Image (spheres, helix red, strand yellow):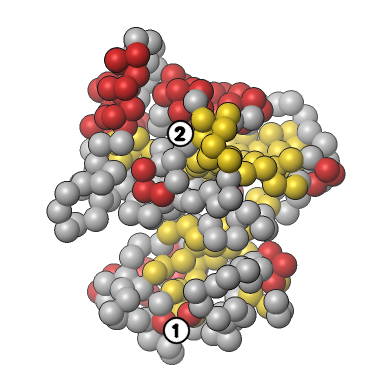
Amino acid sequence: MPLRSKYLLAGLLLTGCASAGSAPPKAAAAALPGFSPVSGPVVRDGRYTQAPASVVAFVAALPTQSVLLPVSLRQKLLSGQVYLRTLPGTGGRSDYLLADQNGARYSLWLRSFQGREPGTTGYLLQMRMACSAIDAAQAQAEEEDLSAARRACAQAHAEYADTGLRAYRIADGQAPEDVSASLKAPERALGRARLDRYDAQGADPIAVDDSRIDAAPTLRWVVNADPEQPLPAKDERVFQGGYKSHAGFVIWNGDGFEVRDSVPRALWPCPASADAPCPDPQDRYVSGAK
């Protein structure tokens, strides 16, 4: 690919990430809620370096209809340097946490998990591409079908073709298995009526909290309240002084992914420095002291 084309594609990919105006950017609807489009993931204490070969191979092997981005663009995102954190995995093997960019400018985020059995690996990931970049991406990947990305961008107010959170499992050298559908959607934990009340109070949609993903094999789905309109304390899903509502945990159990409504403290540890008290006495979904 000519260098000029590479820069053009990269620039188009990020178009819309920092849109002008007061309205926050909106991601296309996804099967499972992922990161907030206005914040994105952060790889803390990571190195800016090459992605591991195993991760590059895994990402390239995924079907475009599932992850929306063409193979050529995925390879480009991982061909340079990424923010990478290497974490201790099961059996002395390494887990990886990486993103092509920290924060709202990201296009690819991934966390890998070694299984109890050698040869088993789990992956959580999210990818997105600015809707304005699809034509340029198609020109660079003429043989690939980007109809799924186009459908995502055809939805009202969509600025991104966004996969949302997706889960994969690899066992014994087989092709990656998409296990996203096995995860219970967090909307079911909160219910439509409660979500409608949250929306009326100015709360954000359900989004991923990745604040413990470098310390435990756990993500959390939460609703963040409008800072000026905390959610009512009588709501049993609410914690952190009314500023968050709990929608479930996604954990790697050593063999596969599962959704749990509550976890022990080991799976949601208190951070070394916290903006809010930890343990939070209102957070009934995490048991145990520090």
Q: Is residue 174 visible?
A: yes
Looking at the picture, how far across and down is residue 275, in whole percent? 49, 74
Coordinates of residue 252 in the picture (x, y in percent): 68, 52
Q: Is residue 137 above or below residue 106?
A: above
How crowded pointer 2 is (Cα within 10 Å; few <14, some 14-19, many 20+) is rated as many
Residue corresponding to mark 1: 241
**In the displayed structure, does residue 280 sit left or right of residue 19?**
right
The residue tagged 2 is 67
Q: Residue furthest bottom?
A: 234
Task: Answer few, some or many: residues within 10 Å of disc 1's Cα (few below 14, many 20 plus, some between 14 and 19).
Answer: some
Residue shown at 43%/59% (left/top)? Answer: 207
Identify which residue is drawn at 63% across, 69% down.
272
Q: Secondary structure at mark 1?
A: helix
Residue 118, horizontal then vertical, whole percent:
82, 36
Q: Which-is-in-front pick, marks 1 and 2?
A: 1
Which residue is drawn at the image coordinates 44% and 74% (left, top)?
244
Q: Quadrant of residue 12?
A: top left
Question: Gap between marks 1 and 2, in whole Å?
Answer: 37 Å
Residue 50 rendering spot, x and y as whole percentages: 58, 29
Quadrant location, the C terminus: bottom right
Q: Is residue 30 left or right of residue 5?
A: right
Dot 2: what SS? Answer: helix
Of the image marks 1 and 2, the number of the one nearer the N terminus: 2
Q: Residue furthest left?
A: 21
Residue at 70% in and 47% down: 87
Q: Which of the numbered marks, if any, corresponds to residue 264?
A: none
The residue closer to the viewer here, 151 or 99, is 99
Q: Amino acid at mark 2?
A: Val
Disc 1 marks a residue whose amino acid type is Gly
